[in-house]
């Protein structure tokens, strides 16, 4: 059936972010929301081969920031060996350009608190300063004065080895889950994303909490195993991988993703 002339009017302008967008003019509002052209791949994971549409996919990179990965950051300051947190950097440097080449959004989900900490409870502050006498959220790090996990600071910035491109998306979070009290869910739904890949640190804490919430919200979840790490004991890592495979989604290697995309 041919469209009425009023719906073929070249004066129609886009409102919104495709695919969640209308086209409008003074007389017409087209609410049909045409979908993106599908980009189908077959991805081998640890449990199944997945058929995915990259047009409905995004990559979430969680907490690859100085406070968790740098020798001058907060974790290192309290005596944690942060070298495991740096292991996702090389595979991410390989994977990110491949995702960008097929227009898969890269979403950097970083812990970045308000300077006044007005939305942070005592229970959350206790995690980072259990005695009350240490260096906790918002306090200056001894080596460089950067306030711990404060939005806009060196401490909350992505490590220098991972370059953020202008088209990438940044979301500050304030809890272990990137979905709690943030616009992340609204952004992903506006972009029409239903499948989410997960990378970053720590696998058993912020990555897992974000992935679980994504699963609870109805997203399809894939943990990118070699692009994820933790400074926790090995059994925490093993439990994370087990639980993702068992309950919350799938686990894949970045090489498998790259190979699948190269088949397009």
Image: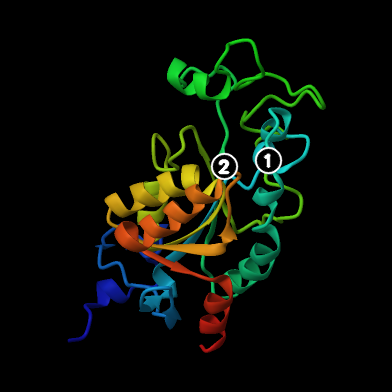
135 or 185: nearer the viewer: 135
Indicate whether 209 appears above or below 150: below
Q: Please tell me how crowded label 1 is: few (under 14), some (14-19), or many (20+) other residues with Cα within 10 Å.
A: some
Task: Please identify the quarter of the rendering in which residue 183 is found.
Answer: top left
- Residue pointed to by mark 1: 157
Relative image position of residue 164 (x, y in whole percent): 67, 54
Indicate whether 70 appears above or below 124: below
121 or 229: nearer the viewer: 229
Relative image position of residue 44 (x, y in whole percent): 44, 80
- Are the residues flagged by discs 2 and 1 in contact, CB closer than 8 Å? yes
At mark 2, the secondary structure is: strand
Which of marks 1 and 2 precedes in the sequence?
2
Task: Please identify the quarter of the rendering in which residue 111 is found.
Answer: top right
Task: Please identify the quarter of the rendering in which residue 134 is found.
Answer: top right
Horizontal placement of 141 versus 181: left or right? right
- Residue pointed to by mark 2: 110
Relative image position of residue 42 (x, y in whole percent): 42, 83
Residue lying farthest to the top in this orientation: 133
Q: Please tell me how crowded label 2 is: few (under 14), some (14-19), or many (20+) other residues with Cα within 10 Å.
A: many
Q: Where is the N terminus found, in terms of image quarters? A: bottom left
Horizontal placement of 142 versus 236: left or right? right
At mark 1, the secondary structure is: loop
Relative image position of residue 4 (x, y in whole percent): 21, 77
Cα distance, mark 2 to mark 1?
Answer: 8 Å
């Amino acid at each position: 059936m041919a469209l009425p002339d009023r719906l073929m009017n070249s004066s129609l302008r886009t409102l919104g972010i495709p695919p969640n967008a209308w086209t409008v003019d003074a007389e017409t509002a087209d609410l049909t929301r045409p979908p993106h052209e599908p980009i189908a791949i077959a991805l081998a994971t640890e449990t199944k081969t997945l058929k995915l549409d990259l047009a409905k996919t995004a990559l979430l990179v969680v907490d690859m920031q100085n406070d968790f990965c740098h020798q001058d950051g907060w974790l290192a300051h309290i005596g944690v060996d942060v070298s495991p947190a740096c292991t996702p950097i090389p595979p991410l440097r390989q994977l990110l350009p491949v995702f960008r080449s097929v227009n898969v959004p890269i979403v950097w989900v970083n812990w970045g608190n308000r300077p006044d900490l007005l939305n942070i409870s005592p229970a959350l502050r206790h995690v980072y300063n259990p005695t009350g006498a240490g260096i906790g959220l918002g306090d200056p790090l001894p080596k460089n004065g950067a306030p711990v996990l404060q939005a806009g600071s060196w401490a909350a910035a992505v490590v220098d080895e991972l370059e953020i491109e202008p088209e990438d998306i940044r979301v500050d979070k304030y809890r272990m889950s990137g979905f709690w009290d943030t616009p992340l869910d609204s952004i992903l739904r506006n972009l029409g994303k239903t499948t989410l890949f997960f990378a970053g640190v720590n696998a058993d804490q912020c990555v897992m909490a974000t992935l679980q919430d994504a699963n609870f919200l109805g997203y399809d979840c894939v943990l990118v195993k070699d692009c994820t790490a933790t400074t926790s004991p090995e059994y925490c890592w093993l439990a994370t991988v087990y639980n993702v495979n068992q309950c919350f989604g799938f686990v894949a290697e970045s090489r498998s993703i790259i190979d699948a995309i190269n088949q397009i």
